[in-house]
Image (tube, helix red, strand yellow):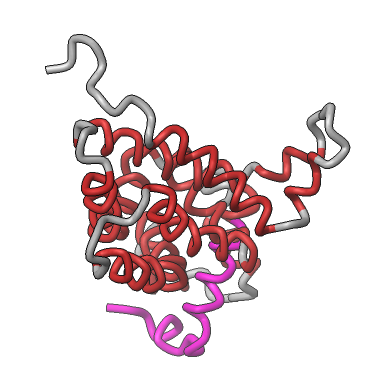
Amino acid sequence: MPSDAASNLQPETEKNLLDAAIELYGQHGTQAVSLNQIRKHAKVANEAAIRYYFRNKEGLLARSLDRVAEKIEPNLSALATQLESMDTPPPVRTILMHFGIPFTALFESDSNSLNFLGSLTHEEGETGQKLLAEKFGPVLLRYENLLIRAMPSKAPELVHLHFYLAINLLLHGLSDISLLKFVPSASPKAKSFLTDPTLLVEAFISFVHAGVVSETTPPAGYD
């Protein structure tokens, strides 16, 4: 039973805690931030608030993921539906571009949310990976099936692997793109990718596309 103090929390408390969690997790990672830091950042005085709403850290992570998914999953599903409605399989690049649009839009509008997704996979181990798979698994499978249709000569198992690698690159590549500010380059225009989202997306999708379409036959020794 929740305490009377917890029951009297303001309606916006849950939202404030989630906003604070995504912001701090996105900036510092999920392992570097305590629940108490999140509560204080949300300006919530009641020390029982996180336990009341989320029970524990895993519950907070799951609800934070729900909040981020609300920003991208509907667009991912709608774009998948567009591709699935085509009479002939769309090109691989088109599929990847449609898949990447919601993530790059999130990167532009709320980089902390995208960084939080990346932190889940790297810092929370199987717990974070399972949360992501459960939340996005159905829509990811739709895109994978589209890729299989677009590359009938490529083993589905390789499509699965290469699509996973593409997802990983998308999450962590966008999160780490600011590294371009510090890495020396022979080209004076290299940093333009940081200021031109269209250029960044085109270059990134081209890179991912090359990996996904590679090796259209199973490797030697594959059974």
**Depth order, front residue of 87/191:** 87
Q: Quadrant of the N terminus?
A: bottom left
- For the question of whether residue 51 can be seen, the reply is no
Residue 55's place in the image compared with 124, above or below, is below
Horizontal side of 196 relative to 137 (left or right) equals: right
> Which residue is the extreme one toward the front?
88
Q: Quadrant of the C terminus?
A: top left
Q: Nearer the viewer, residue 54 or 157?
A: 157
In the picture provided, is 52 more to the left or to the right than 183?
Answer: left
Of all residues, the one furthest to the right in this rendering is 188
Q: Residue at x 79, y 31 (%)?
A: 183
**Residue 167 appears in the picture as rendered:** yes
In the displayed structure image, the side of residue 222 where residue 92 appears, left or right: right
Residue 3, magenta (yes or no): yes
Residue that appears at 60% across and 50% down: 202
Q: How many callouts does the rendering have?
A: 0
Q: Is residue 176 magenta?
A: no
Please report the residue visible at 57 percent of the width from the left and 47 percent of the height from the top. Answer: 29
Q: Is residue 182 above or below residue 89?
A: above
User: Where 166 falls versus 59 (above or below)?
Assistant: above
Q: Is residue 185 left or right of residue 146?
A: right
x and y, in percent, of residue 173 in the image = 57, 42
Q: Quadrant of residue 111?
A: bottom right
Residue drawn where x is 33% and y is 79% of the image: 2
Q: Position of residue 48 (x, y in %)?
A: 46, 70
Where's residue 117, x and y in %? 47, 52
Q: Secondary structure of the magenta portion, mostly? A: helix
Which span of residues is magenta-colored?
Answer: 1-24
Name the residue furthest top: 221
Along the line of sight, the residue nearer the viewer: 90 or 110: 90
Give how far across and how far down residue 63 sits, in percent. Answer: 39, 66
